[in-house]
Amino acid sequence: MPVYSKKVMDHFTNPRNVGEIENPDGVGEVGNPVCGDMMTFYIKVKDNRLEDVKFKTFGCGAAIAVSSMVSEMAKGKTLEEAMKITPRSVADELEGLPKQKFHCSNLGAQALNKAIENYLSKKKKGGKK
């Protein structure tokens, strides 16, 4: 059985920012068919900053911990800063992930990036600001 850091266990047992944002500015959904993990990130953007970040994750403890950590890392950041959140930086913030669970950190960063891309593409189309 994988061994998790205290930080992973904390974010798994007390995940931050769980839920949906009503009328989100961007939504990003990713899934891993191999392990069955699904993550959806919702963002609210104000003045080019992530004013709010929420997520819904269906998956293992590591996937939930990663989602929670990514949401914490992204909140309050500019879109550019948030796009720089990498799977490695997420794993480092969580004080490491077991090798067989590292793919979860990929999903968290991808879901956040997709939500930001979704927001930017809506904005380009002249959608709501």
Image: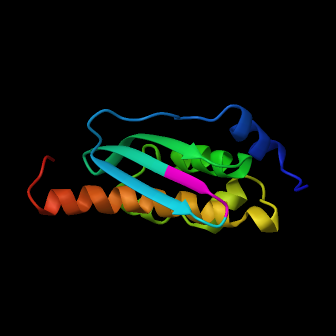
Magenta region includes residue 122: no
Residue for point 71% across, 60% down = 92
- Label the magenta part by its dominant secondary structure: strand
Residue located 69% across and 39% down the image? 11
The residue at the point 74 percent across, 62 percent down is 101
Do we see residue 72 in this rendering? Answer: no
Residue at position x 62%, y 57% in the image:
36
- In depth, the one of 28 and 93 nearer the eye is 28
Which colouring convention does the figure follow?
A: rainbow
Residue 39 placement, left or right of 96: left
Q: Nearer the viewer, residue 37 or 63?
A: 37
Q: Quadrant of the image for the N terminus?
A: bottom right
Most foreground residue, 48 or 26: 26
What range is drawn magenta here? Answer: 35-39
In the rendered image of this protein, does residue 91 appear above or below residue 21?
A: below
- Left or right? Give the position of 95 relative to 55: right
Residue 32: x and y in percent read 58, 64
| Quadrant hosting residue 37 | bottom right
Q: Is residue 74 above or below residue 85?
A: above
| Coordinates of residue 15 in the picture (x, y in percent) | 63, 35
Residue 40 visible from this viewpoint = yes
In the rendered image, residue 97, in percent from the top left (x then y), is placed at: 77, 59
61 relative to 17 in the view: left or right: right
Residue 41 location (% of width, % of height): 44, 48
